[in-house]
Amino acid sequence: MTRLEELITSAANLTLDGMTLGVQNQVKRSFIRAFGRWFEAVVPSSEEAAILASVAGVGGKKALAVGGSKFPLPWAAFVNGYKSQSGHQEEFHHGAGVSPTPVVASILLALAQDGPVSGADLVLALAVGMEVAVRVGLILGCSHRERGWYPSATAGLFGAVVAGAKLRGFALLEFRNVMGLAASLATGTVEARDVGGLKHSLARSSYNAVTAVMLAERGFTSNPQAVDGKGGFLQIASSSANMDWLRFPNNTEWEILNLVNTSPPSGPYRDIRSEEVVVDSNEDFLTHAQEHLTRTKAEMLLKQLWSLESVEDASGMIESALADWKVAFNRKLLS
């Protein structure tokens, strides 16, 4: 069994009992901060209108996106991914150069509505997705970003497809296929940082991740060596790929426990360390949520997110929150 197959097997078999309380709390804290960023984000109406127009008449399953509009699943993830980068604070892993939450959480917010999905399902999917994203970033190393790649989009895509596969309950073969598909869909550079390019990179990675999950679910096959083979993505996208990181952690080795709440550096991350900005995830969430929901509904949603592993109907919880968001947004437009 290869390292990649071992990682896939461990991710597929992970249960809540296999995660420490610290890991579970980190995952929930990250999801709450993601919601805070989504509530903070403002997407120009012209862009959202353009997306809605481009998918008019497109069939298939749809989901509410951040902001409350309904899109086909990949496009819902696209909108979520775009808005996930609009907030000023990111949870960042300095060693990997990756913010793992945006793409992973964006696709799960869309796929969870194609339920039923429990809160425990979401916690597990978030955990494996975020951890894989960070580990892929560690494999790729500094040279990946120095070559112009945007690790939060590229490594985030691999984490996102693992998260989606976990949420969908994929068998090992489907896990292998979705990873191989991801290798052909990884994209995102740092060059367009000043003109919204990073937002679009996270959006496209979120879209591509849902597409890969849906294709694998429908029987599309791929070769996982496209990920870790001699000519695979990990080798060609880095000049010094460290494949020792291609493994799943035991209880004491979770890299997501090393995330810091800080703005990502603007240059090569091995040389620049941004000052850490301490932000209380609860207050940050409530500050931004109250702009779209009542204080009571915001506090109720926060309480549900902190006890996510006990929520039986996470699909309904997410749909309700996004629907309330849309009502509040429309009310503001009319006021």
Image (cartoon, rainbow, N blue to C red):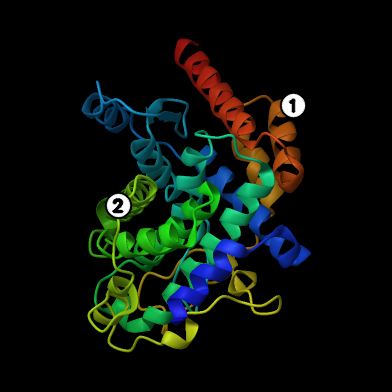
Percent from the top left, x then y, of residue 264? 45, 66
Q: What residue did someone put label 2 on?
A: 220
| N-term-proximal mark, 1 vs 2 | 2
Q: Is there any visible trace of residue 272 in the rendered image?
A: no
Query: Would you say the residues marked 1 and 2 are in contact, meaning their CB atoms lie under 8 Å apart?
Result: no
From the viewer's perspective, tell me whether residue 236 is left or right of residue 274: left
**In the rendered structure, which amino acid carries the disc numbered 1?**
Thr
Residue 161 location (% of width, % of height): 42, 56
Question: How crowded is the residue under tag 1: few (<14 C-alpha within 10 Å), some, or many (20+)?
Answer: few
Residue at image position (42%, 84%) is 270
34 left or right, relative to 240: right
What label does residue 296 carry, if any? 1
Question: Which type of secondary structure does the marked residue at label 2 adopt?
Answer: loop
The foreground one among 224 and 184 is 224
For the residues marked 1 and 2, what is the alpha-carbon distance in whole angstroms?
Answer: 45 Å
Mark in front: 1 vs 2: 2
